[in-house]
Image (cartoon, helix red, strand yellow):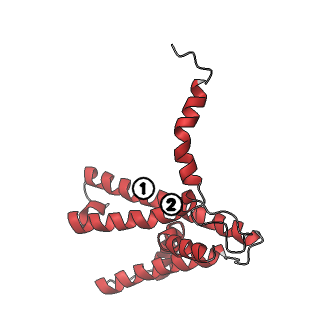
């Protein structure tokens, strides 16, 4: 039996606090002028995670082939594909929301840099739609209904925009720090 005055909750808080303090540490600072909101490691990681996951998925395609992401295959394989793509979509959507929120927070602060969140989100989504159009062109496929096809691609690309915009925004945030 432990007769110390420290409670179990205090010991747990003290033990786990290094993870929270590492993630909340201001890795990128508060801006060159000191008026920008802090940018923690947790913020940077949430913005870089979608791109890192996409790189890992690209390596998986190189090693295992693209069939692992084919959703039109029989059930066990389709479940794996939907699971992997669902994880990517969730991580990217979270990153896009964090990017938008951080850019708005910086723009409302007293910092000299005023990022427009839609500049990052919309341009990245348009780039992703353009890549889809290029994929159709390279494959020699003609799109019978281009407006619904590309409108649907844009709706999917908006939450996925942090795949491209996350690293760009982190670089700009660091540049203005």
Q: Is residue 114 visible?
A: yes
Tag in front: 1 or 2: 2
Q: CA distance from mark 1 to mark 2?
A: 16 Å
Q: Nearer the viewer, residue 95 or 21?
A: 21
Residue 87 x, y percent position in the rendering:
42, 55
Look at the image and tell me in which quarter the C terminus lies: bottom right
Residue 87: assigned label: 1
Residue 157 x, y percent position in the rendering:
50, 71
Residue 45: assigned label: 2
Q: Which of the 4 image quarters holds residue 88?
A: bottom left
Q: Residues within 10 Å of mark 1 (few under 14, many from 20)?
A: some
Q: Residues within 10 Å of mark 2 (few under 14, many from 20)?
A: some
Q: Residue furthest front?
A: 4
Q: Is residue 150 left or right of residue 10?
A: left
Q: Nearer the viewer, residue 40 or 108?
A: 40
Q: Is residue 143 left or right of residue 177?
A: left
At a point 41% along the width and 65% down the height, the residue shown is 52
Q: Secondary structure at mark 1?
A: helix
Q: Are the two marked residues, 1 and 2, in contact with CB atoms closer than 8 angstroms?
A: no
Mark 1 or mark 2, which has the lower sequence index?
Answer: 2
Q: Which of the 4 image quarters holds residue 78?
A: bottom left
At a point 42% along the width and 56% down the height, the residue shown is 86
Residue 51 x, y percent position in the rendering:
44, 67
């Amino acid at each position: 039996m432990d007769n110390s005055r420290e409670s179990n909750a205090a010991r747990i808080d003290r033990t786990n606090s290094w993870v929270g303090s590492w993630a909340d540490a201001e890795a990128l600072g508060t801006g060159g002028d000191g008026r920008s909101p802090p940018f923690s490691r947790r913020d940077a990681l949430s913005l870089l995670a979608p791109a890192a996951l996409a790189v890992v998925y690209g390596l998986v395609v190189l090693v295992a082939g693209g069939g692992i992401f084919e959703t039109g295959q029989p059930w066990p394989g389709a479940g794996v594909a939907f699971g992997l793509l669902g994880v990517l979509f969730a991580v990217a959507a979270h990153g896009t929301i964090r990017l938008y929120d951080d850019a708005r927070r910086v723009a409302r602060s007293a910092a000299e840099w005023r990022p427009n969140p839609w500049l990052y989100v919309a341009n990245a989504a348009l780039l992703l739609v353009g890549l889809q159009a290029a994929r159709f062109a390279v494959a020699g496929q003609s799109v019978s209904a281009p407006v619904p096809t590309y409108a649907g691609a844009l709706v999917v690309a908006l939450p996925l925009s942090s795949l491209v915009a996350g690293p760009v925004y982190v670089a700009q945030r660091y540049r203005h720090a």
